[in-house]
Amino acid sequence: MISATKNIIKSTFIFLIFLCLSSCQDENIVEPCTQMLLIGNEIYDNYPDDQLTILDVTLEGDCLQINFATSGCSGNSWIVELVGREEILESLPPQRLIRLSLENNEICDAYIGKSVTFDITPSRVSGNEIILNLDGWDKKIVYVY
């Protein structure tokens, strides 16, 4: 009887550890923003504009995640920036033009996807909302802060 009770306690303990480990792992952990949105007309006009395809855009708080793909070898040498124009388009809410800048010197036939995250707080203007129009993405990004 004591042996059976010990086995039940042991089994329960192992089950609880397994339950905690499996439920404590959040598969939807959002990576912190790794880069900052750069604002400036000269930056917007002159930063590299190599070809890419935007696959998905997600806004979580102040962090904009952009998934994109293009040809290359590994993507390790790519230089990626999010750049925006200084001018604000007068509308309610106001709007700003932004684009993903890519410098890609890789000459390979592979099609590689990459995800990058940007802190978009520099896009804020007076008020608490702005629409970001991302070049190559047909949906408006409504940033509420």
Image (cartoon, rainbow, N blue to C red):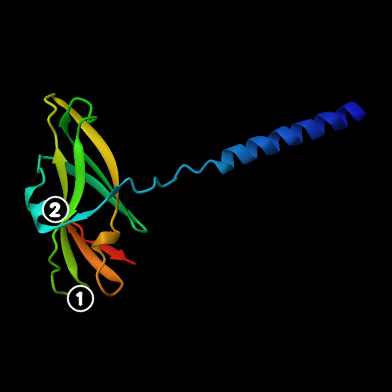
Q: How crowded is mark 1: few (under 14 residues within 10 Å), some or many (20 or more)?
A: few
- For marks 1 and 2, the one nearer the N-term is 1
Do we see residue 7 in this rendering? Answer: yes
Q: Quadrant of residue 13?
A: top right
Nearest the viewer among 70 and 41 is: 41
Residue 62: x, y in percent? 34, 58
Q: Residue at x 20, y 58 (%)?
A: 139
Looking at the picture, which amino acid does disc 1 mark? Leu
| Image-based side of 94 in relation to 62, left or right | left
Looking at the picture, which amino acid does disc 2 mark? Asp
Disc 1 from disc 2: Cα separation: 20 Å
Q: Which residue is drawn at 22% across and 65% down?
A: 131
Q: In which quarter of the image is residue 97?
A: bottom left
Q: Residue at x 10, y 58 (%)?
A: 41
User: Which residue lies under the disc numbered 2?
Assistant: 135
Q: Residue at x 27, y 64 (%)?
A: 142
**Quarter of the picture holding the N terminus:** top right
**Quarter of the picture holding the C terminus:** bottom left
Residue 123: x, y in percent? 24, 62
User: Which residue lies under the disc numbered 1?
Assistant: 92
